[in-house]
């Protein structure tokens, strides 16, 4: 158990509030309740989310329980974290559909045995709460305390409105911790304010406050903002092995070793060895292949990782074309832009035009330079890893 704990503490944790409290909870030998709350705004989990999930998995393997809290009530409000504008409110049907998909995706990482996994919904208490009880919860917190949130301060400076339902969001998330009797929560640092409200409320209600652990946040595939569904700079848990491998191979070189440390199980000594080789002049691409291999292996197994590594070597390193690719049946007078859009290689016509203007589209090895070019049968290639056989 001591070795498991040391291993747990040494990887991907930025801050623990507080470490002494965590150790004291472990000394009681009781099963800890780990709060994992999600608002079902979009059922797409990516590698950034997975960092927290894998830490919870480690604790499950030590015998502790993850309480998976579906914020079906709070999803009707929308967490303003990181948002300069009010989030659009969602319907109950949308939330219910997305909640099922969330559960399916977290089960790719978390153990779902009832001994170490429990599912709750915060509509179970907020949906039945009487007005006087709700007002008593509100009466414990001042406006001055709430308005300290950085995103609220940002909106004030930019002259943007803050609506009352958004002001109440941290209180609702905090009160969840009281109902769940949360011992521990593992979050990204952007959720720290909300979960500190959890500690605040637990103390008010005579509970031992939850320990808060914040995890390492890395930039997304573009090397700029953190992985985000809205920015499209992420590797989804639902991506195929091929998509995962290809996306990882597209990252800037300066992210390679950050990603190796955070997103893979590769031994730290092996990572240092690879880093040393690159500093001495080795091609960073070789280390990136190791990274892509390890990510695919973690989520899909060694066979798929080996297959995608070989495919990458054959297709991209040797300038070849994959043996299998999607086929597209060409209609009369369709343009290259039409083919790119209809085959879903791009999200919009403007994306297609941009890809052509940047020299990223070719047919049978010849670059397409005219944005109005009519498509012809052959192998269409977009970027480094997307191929379609036009028939």
Image (cartoon, rainbow, N blue to C red):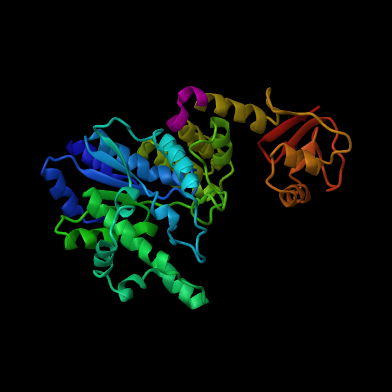
Q: Quadrant of the C terminus?
A: top right
Number of marks? 0
In percent of width and height, residue 115 lies at: 24, 32
In percent of width and height, residue 155 lies at: 48, 72
Left or right: where 326 falls relative to 27: right
Task: Tell me the residue at 32%/32% (across/down).
Answer: 111
Left or right: where 31 falls relative to 270: left
Q: Quadrant of the N terminus?
A: top left
- Compared with 258, 58 (above or below) is above
Q: Is residue 149 visible?
A: yes
Secondary structure mostly seen in magenta is helix
Q: Is residue 46 visible?
A: no
In percent of width and height, residue 296 lies at: 49, 32
Left or right: where 30 falls relative to 338: left
Task: Tell me the residue at 28%/73% (across/down).
Answer: 142
Residue interval drawn in magenta = 297-304
In percent of width and height, residue 46 lies at: 47, 43
Task: Tell me the residue at 84%/37% (across/down).
Answer: 375
Residue 122 falls inside the magenta stretch: no
Nearer to me, 150 or 315:
150
Nearer to me, 390 or 174:
174
């Amino acid at each position: 158990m001591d070795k498991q704990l040391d291993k747990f503490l040494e990887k991907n944790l930025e801050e623990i509030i507080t470490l002494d409290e965590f150790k004291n909870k472990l000394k009681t030998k009781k099963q800890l309740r780990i709060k994992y709350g999600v608002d079902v705004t979009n059922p797409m989990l990516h590698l950034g989310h997975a960092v927290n999930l894998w830490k919870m998995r480690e604790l499950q393997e030590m015998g502790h329980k993850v309480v998976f809290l579906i914020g079906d009530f709070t999803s009707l409000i929308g967490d303003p974290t990181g948002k300069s504008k009010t989030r659009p409110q969602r319907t109950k049907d949308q939330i219910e559909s997305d909640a099922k998909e969330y559960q399916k995706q977290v089960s790719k990482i978390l153990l779902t045995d009832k001994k170490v996994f429990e599912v709750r919904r915060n509509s179970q208490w907020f949906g039945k709460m009487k007005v006087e009880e709700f007002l008593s919860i509100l009466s414990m917190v001042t406006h001055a305390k709430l308005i300290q949130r950085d995103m609220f301060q940002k909106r004030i400076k930019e002259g943007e409105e803050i609506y009352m339902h958004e002001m109440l969001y941290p209180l609702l998330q905090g009160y969840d911790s009281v109902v769940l009797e949360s011992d521990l929560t593992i979050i990204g640092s952007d959720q720290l304010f909300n979960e500190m409200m959890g500690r605040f409320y637990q103390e008010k209600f005579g509970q031992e406050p939850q320990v808060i652990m914040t995890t390492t946040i890395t930039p997304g595939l573009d090397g700029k903002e953190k992985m985000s569904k809205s920015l499209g700079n992420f590797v989804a848990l639902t991506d195929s092995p091929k998509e995962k491998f290809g996306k990882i191979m597209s990252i800037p070189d300066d992210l390679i070793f950050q990603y190796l440390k955070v997103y893979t199980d590769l031994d730290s000594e092996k990572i240092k060895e690879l880093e040393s080789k690159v500093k001495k002049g080795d091609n960073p691409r070789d280390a990136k292949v190791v990274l892509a291999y390890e990510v695919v292996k973690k989520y899909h197994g060694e066979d798929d990782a080996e297959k995608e590594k070989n495919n990458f070597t054959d297709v991209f390193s040797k300038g070849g074309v994959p043996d299998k690719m999607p086929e597209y049946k060409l209609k009369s007078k369709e343009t290259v832009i039409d083919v790119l859009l209809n085959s879903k290689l791009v999200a919009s016509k403007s994306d297609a035009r941009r890809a052509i203007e940047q020299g990223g589209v070719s047919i049978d090895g010849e670059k397409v330079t005219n944005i109005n070019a009519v498509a012809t049968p052959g192998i269409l290639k977009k970027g480094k890893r997307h191929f379609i056989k036009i028939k």
